[in-house]
Image: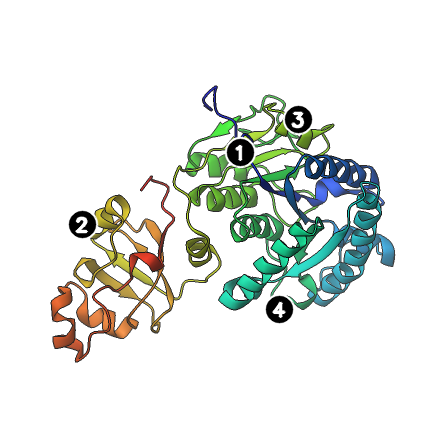
Amino acid sequence: MIENNYSPFESVKRVVVKVGSNVLTEDNGLNLKAIRSITRQIGKLIQDGLEVLLVSSGAMASGIKKIGLGARPDELPKRQAVAAVGQAGLMMEYEKAFARQHLKVAQILLTSEDLSNRKRYLNARNTLNTLLAWGVVPIINENDTVWIEEIKLGDNDNLAAMITLLMDADVLINLTDIDGLFSRDPRVHPDAELIRTVTRINQEIERYAGDIPGALGTGGMISKIHAARKVNSAGVPMIIAKGDKPNVLLKLFSGKQLGTFFIPRKQRLTSRKCWIAYSLKPRGVIQIDDGAARAILQKGKSLLPSGIIEVINDFGVGAPVEFKDRRDQKLGIGLVNYSSADIDRIKGLKSSRIKQVLGHKSYDEVIHRDNLAITAEDEV
């Protein structure tokens, strides 16, 4: 449980609010009442001195209504076209709603490539920081129109987590169509119990979430749990709450306990380590022994070749690579100083022998601690 003297909002300066499709849509398209309510609350938070970034779903529902389709199309090009049409309508409604709060808005459309490329990642952060400094509300969505794969499950839950880490936000609030994480789907099982706090995301929590699917959006509760895991491991709290509850944001910031609160680990990752951990796609795996795992997790050490047991997949110098323990538990991700072929040759050896085996030695470490991000659940 949460300690009585602890509030996740005591020192919050910057917040990411994610609003799901089920909150923003109704049978005939966008739920304008919900949009006006959420924008009014965000306006009040900004008036109180907070910086707010909004990650918003709803483009698909808006596009379906504007085009006059009976349902969401199955073909990817049609879905992308519908999202493109709907995004314009969604932004128009947000612009009108925020204008009532005397606020301007900016549309930001991102893909995973924008966040995996370090230069584009920093450019996105600089742009968002400038908008916040100007008092403009950034409204962020996945750029579905140019996405080359199918729209993935829970994209905007993941995107909200990525934006939280990108912008060093203090809390992520995920507004959905139910009161939080339940032991079972409350829409089907009246006896389902609301889980008020989650201190550790384990298999039991994931099992609860897996039983609560999404109705209108691309992701259910499990995608929100994955988002919570990301921000929690970086030291940031997350709350799942019911988006249409009257003044839900204002009540949360007044100290009222609503929804499900995911307690983060105490140590926050730096912005660069968040980028390594969650924006880069791992190219391979390095399995390490127990001694190396303890040195990294408990002492903050670098990964040396002596602690490496096995190298999986081919990758080059500078590639992001997962490192796991003997039990195949993922401990984190790091940028390697040697290729997979060279690491395979020096694994298990002391650093003093690297030059003898390879004919050169650029570094003592396979992954330096400055380029190593721990994502394991256990505290470091």
Residue at the outermost top position:
4
Check disc 3: other Cα within 10 Å, few if <14, some if 14-19, many if 20+: some
Q: Which residue is mark 2?
A: 291
* Mark drawn on residue 11: 1
Give the residue type that dot 2 points to: Gly
**Which corner quadrant of the image does residue 322 belong to?**
bottom left
Image position of 207 (left or right of 367):
right
What is the image's colouring? rainbow
Query: Of tags 2 and 1, which is closer to the observer?
Result: 1
Image position of 314 (left or right of 346):
right
Q: Earlier in the sequence, mark 4 or mark 2?
A: 4
Q: Which residue is mark 4?
A: 148
Residue 208, given in percent of the width and then of the height, sits at 51, 34
Give the residue type that dot 4 points to: Ile
Give the residue type that dot 1 points to: Ser
Check disc 4: other Cα within 10 Å, few if <14, some if 14-19, many if 20+: few
Residue at the outermost bottom position:
359
- For image coordinates 27% across by 49% down, the residue present is 300
Q: Which residue is mark 3?
A: 251
C-alpha gap between disc 1 and disc 3: 16 Å
Check disc 1: other Cα within 10 Å, few if <14, some if 14-19, many if 20+: few
Q: Secondary structure at mark 2?
A: helix
Q: Earlier in the sequence, mark 4 or mark 1?
A: 1
Image position of 289 (left or right of 152):
left
**Which corner quadrant of the image does residue 72 belong to?**
bottom right
- For image coordinates 42% across by 51% down, the residue present is 270
Residue 84, given in percent of the width and then of the height, sits at 76, 62
Query: Of tags 1 and 3, which is closer to the observer?
Result: 1
Q: Disc 3 vs disc 4: Cβ atoms closer than 8 Å? A: no
Q: Secondary structure at mark 4?
A: loop
**Which corner quadrant of the image does residue 24 belong to?**
top right
Q: Disc 4 vs disc 1: Cβ atoms closer than 8 Å? A: no
